[in-house]
Structures are given as C-alpha cells and as structure tokens.
Image: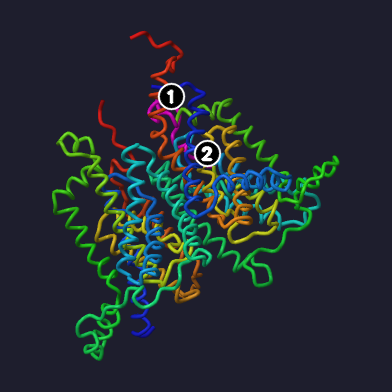
Amino acid sequence: MDLNTLIQILDSTIRLATPLLLACLAGLFSERAGVFDIGLEAKMLVSAFFAAAVAATTGSVWLGLLAGIGASMVFALIHGIASITFRGDQLISGVALNFLASGMTVLIARDWFSEGGRTPALIDGGRFQPIDLPFARALSDVPILGPVYSELVSGHTALVYVAFAMVPVTWYVLFRTRFGLRLRAVGENPGAVDTAGISVVRLRYSAVLIAGILCGIAGAYLATGLAAGFVKDMTAGRGYIALAALIFAKWRPWYALGACLLFGLLDAIGNRYQSIELLGVPVPGQFMQALPYILTVVILAGFVGKAIPPRAGGAPYVKER
Amino acid sequence: MTLPRWADVVLIPLINLALALFVSGLVVLLIGEDPINAMQIMVRGAVGSTYGWGYTLFYATNFIFTGLAVAVAFHARLFNIGGEGQAQLGALGVALVCLALPWPHWTLALPFAIVGGAVFGAAWAAIPAYLQARRGSHIVITTIMFNFIASALLVYLLVGAMKAPGMAPESARFPAGTFLPNARDVFGMVGIPFARSPLNVSFIVGLLACMAIWLLLWRTRLGYEIRAYGHSEPAAIYAGISPFRIVMITMLISGALAGLMAVNAVQGEAQRLLQDNVLGAGFVGIAVALMGRSHPVGVLIAAVLFGALYQGGAELEFETSVPREMVLVIQALVILFTGALHNMVRGPVTATFLRFGRRPDGSVKPAA
C-alpha cells in the first residue's frame, strides 16, 4: 500500500468518523447524566432530513444546519419529557423515537418534495464546502508531511473540525467545570445532588438537550456534508455504532475519539475493499461491517477491560415523598 | 395507589391507543389527507375481505411470535430488543432444515422446521443472556449488537455458501414438500371460498404458542420463578431461585419464540432464505408486548391489531398519497404512549378514580 492510498483511506476515515464522533459525544453527555439514549439514531435522522430539506429550499446550508439542530432538539425534548418528567422507560422511549424518525422523515419528504422519500440533490450553497487550511497548497510538495497536511488535515468541511474540536470541549466541560461535575454526579448518585440543593431535573434536561444539539450537527453533516441530500434511513445504524463507540470508550471523551476513529477506519476499509487478506486469511467485507459490534460485545463482556456505565443510568429519579 | 384491574388492563391501553391514533390523525391531516377517510380505508383493507383478513392474520402470526418473545423476557424484567436478530437466525435454522432433505410432506417438515427455528433463535439469544447473567453486560446493548451481527452473517452466507445460482442474494427455493398449506387450501377443503394470501398453518402454531406460554408462566414452577425473579431479584434469591438459571432459561425461551417467526415468514411465505426475512417484525414485537401487557391473550389481540395496521397501511398507500411509513409512525406512537409515557395517562386516570365514587380497592369514599 503506497502513501497515497493510505492517505485516501485515512481521509475517508476522518469523514466517516465525524458523524459517529458527534453522536457519541451526544450520548456521552446524556448517559453521564443518567439518561440512557438509544435514540441517537432518531435524532440524527430527523436532523439529516430537516437540514437537507431547508438547505434545498432556501439554498443556505447554515439555515439547514439550524433546522437540523432544531428538529433534533425537539426529539431530545420528547425523550426528556418521557424519561425525566414522566419517569418512563428510557430505553423504550428511545426505541419509539427511532421508529418515529424513520417513519416521519419519509412521510414528510414525500409530502414536501414528491421524490419518493428523498430530498432534491443539494448543489453549491446547499452543501458544506471543504475548507483549505493556510499553506495547504504551498506545503503539498513537501515529502510525506506535505500530502498529510494538505490532503488529510486540510480540505474538510467546517463540521468536521467542529466535531474534532468538541472532544477537548466535552472533556473540559465535563471534567473541569462545576456544571460538568454536577452532571456527572447526577448520573452516579442523583440523590446526593438533590440533597445539595441542585435540581436533578434541570441538569438532566440540559444534558439531554446538549445531546440534541450534537446529534443535530451530526445529522446535518450526514445530509449536507458527507452526502448531497437526504435519503430514506440514511443514518443506516450509525446511531447504534456511536452507542457502541460510547461503550467501547467507557463513557470518556478522549477514548470516544479513538473508538470513533477506529470504527470509521473499519468503515472506510470496508467501503474500499470487498474483502481483504489478513496474514494470508481472506476476511470477508461483512466481517468488517460486523466488527464494531463484535468488539463492543467483547468489551462489554469485560474480557478486555470492563466497561462500567454510570451507576444511576437508566433509572428515573424519584424524589423522596 | 393501584387502579381496579379492568382500568389497568383495558382502559389505560385503550386510552393510549386512542392517543396514538389521534396524533397519527393529526399527521395525516398535516400531509393533506382526510384522517377519517384514511381510517376507513385501513379498516376496510385490513378486515373488509378474506384477502384482507388473510394478510392481517399472516402479519399477526409474525407479531404473535415476536411479541411473545419480548413478553416472556419482560416477565423476568429483561428487555430483549434482539428479536430481530434472533428471528434472522431462526430463519437460517428453518432454511437449513428445509433445504437439508427432499421432504416428502409438510407434516414431516413442519416439526423439524419448528425445532430448527427455535434452536437457532435460542442460540442467538444465549450469548447475550450468558453475558448478562455471568458478566453483567447490559442485555439491551448486547442484543442490539447481535441484531447487526446477525444481519451481517446472513448477508455473508447469502453471497457465499448458501447462495443460489443467479443474481439475487438468496438461497435456493425450498423443496415442494415443505410448503405449508395456506388458508385458501384449508378453507377450500370445507367449501369456503378464501382469497389467496400467505396466511398458513403457522397461525395455529402461533395460537398454540400463546397457550403454551400462558401455561408456562402461570401454571408451572418455572413460570412462577420467572415472575418472582422479575418482581424482585433479592426476594427470588432469598427463595433459592438462581438468577443465572432464570436469565438463561428466559432468554432461551424468548429467542426460540422469536426464531419461530421464521416458520411463518420463511417456510410459510418466502419459501427461500432472503437477506432480510424479518422486516422489522422483531421490533413490532416490542410494541405488541407493551400493548398486550405481556400477557399471552393481550399479545394475541395486540398482534392482530398490528397485523391489521400493517395490512391496512399497505392498502392506504395503494389508495391515497399516505405512504406505508405511516404505519411506522403509528407504531412509534403506540410504543411511546404505552411504554414510555404511560405515567402521563396513568396519573390523571388514577386521580379521576380517586375523585369519583368508588375507591380502587372497592370501598366507597367516606363522606368528607
């Protein structure tokens, strides 16, 4: 494999890891606050649709991004109402939202655009354009480092850089601010937080809504950055892979970056090669597709380092009466 | 505060269903169709002809199995979200049995296919069950992962080892001796005309499964232990019930039930193994179990209701501009209202009962 191929694969790894990373960090906020979220998929999907729909109608990708984030936050709010206010089952709420998104996006898409459940293909201003970092062109002739900088680091859309910047931001917010401390505490022992006079409900709603924003960006990136428009069920299980990455990362931001890059790499290799040979043994492409899920099960099983979720995760908080 | 039994079992599910249908009606209105008209088309399409009934009950058969699968697990307080993958593996089991021999008659093939589907479905549930019971891995997450692994496995087999000659990634057609008699043949024998539909004898297997699960849960020692474990794990342990044993057995039964769905869908209809043999029925099982309050009779009723919804939805797409995805929306709302938002309905209903007349325990409210 020459340098060029390697760079191409890593380049597509970065692009494929971006939506995973955003959704994974979304799940991180929500689950660290004690609200399980298997509706990441749903939020990404509604966002992808509304981002593409608004971008197609107005011609502005930024309005599309806002619409996507808004739609995703509405879904996050429903999840919050069901699982925080009415203390319903968080997992079931997530399942319901996944179906709702999958059905509703196609329903509205057919009504608005009559193109069989997709949006019109986005052109020019309707898509996020790649950004050339300073000196990318000038440095491209430098051996090895040149192409790495100009092809791999430079030339992505704005949302890619946003996603990667979110990793340190998330780390800082969760581990270096008062809000983050409280948020993590509410996922471990909400009773203690309540005793300290801090509202459990408000903290959990904030976490769920932050997850809504991040999933919104992820969905908008899918439809207006990675692809050029919305198609039915275009998230294709990415919400679940993000969930897998979250567990793989043991609910930590920097590990999340590693997990998402790994799963992105698997995806990139799977897209490029039908099957690859590893140590003389042919590995079928389907195995590569299933690998993120298999790895997650192995991690969950605790054979390679144990993944322990936030202790109060999944349990609605009931104040003593 | 407990409600009278009839309110709990009948009234609240009905209110939830009405709410889900009401919101769905709003959605239909939003996309410029008449909700009343849409409802009429759906009802007529689902139960207005023997053709409609045939499809309704065919879908219902799938949902009976997947609904029971989720319901049994719910009794042990396990959320088996992996019905989809277990049914895919069940499909593989059924296909392997059907393709293994030149079966002379369906009465011979059916019992073996049932065993094949059940064993493969149970096997796929066994690993998540073991990981939950021994290593404490969250069963919801592991079963989700196993859904994806299952579909990758089937694609792998159908482009490789099990692929039939030709373009399509599907297995060879099953021998004619495995074809199950459908409703038209059965009703035809006694002279009743019945339209052509995929409804077949697996429906009866489904009814028997409902009965068996009822017997298991409420008339056997094992069923008692499952329910006891679901109510309170510490109490069950104190009573000498092994959590490991209960989690394993419950999930094996659950996976086997999900796998049995393939007898209807694969042996009964497709007559070959396809890439996706389940088409979301595993997830519908969640809605069915929630609506049916995890009781076999409730599951049966909810399964027929969802069967009607699926068949009615297909007719709706045919006659109006409302696409089939409307069914997904209704299904999502049913899960949302019955599963996640049930306290929203329960609270006001309980308050109403407290306010008017008789108390839930049957005593009359004393004069203030």
Residue ID at (44%, 22%): B3
Which residue is labeled 1 in the image? B239
> Quadrant where the C terminus of chain B lies?
top left
Quick one: which residue is furthest to the top in this view?
B367
Q: Is residue B326 left or right of residue B168?
A: left
SS category of the residue bearing label 1: loop
Residue ID at (66%, 45%): B44
Q: Which residues are magenta?
A: B230-252
> Quadrant where the N terminus of chain B lies?
top left
Q: Can residue B305 be spotted in the picture?
A: yes
Q: Is residue A180 left or right of residue B24?
A: left
Query: Mark 1, chain letter?
Result: B
Colour approach in the figure: rainbow
- Disc assigned to residue A148: none
Q: Can residue B56 be spotted in the picture?
A: no
Towards the viewer: A246 or B196: B196
For badge 1, the amino acid type reads Ala
SS category of the residue bearing label 2: helix
- Disc assigned to residue B289: 2
Quick one: which residue is furthest to the bottom in this view?
A141
Q: Is residue B63 left or right of residue B198?
A: left
Magenta: predominant secondary structure element? helix
Query: Mark 2, chain letter?
Result: B
Pinpoint residue B322: horizontal percent, then vertical percent. 55, 55
Residue ID at (52%, 57%): B150
- Is A205 in the magenta? no
Towards the viewer: A105 or A189: A105
B30 up-or-down from A192: above or below: below
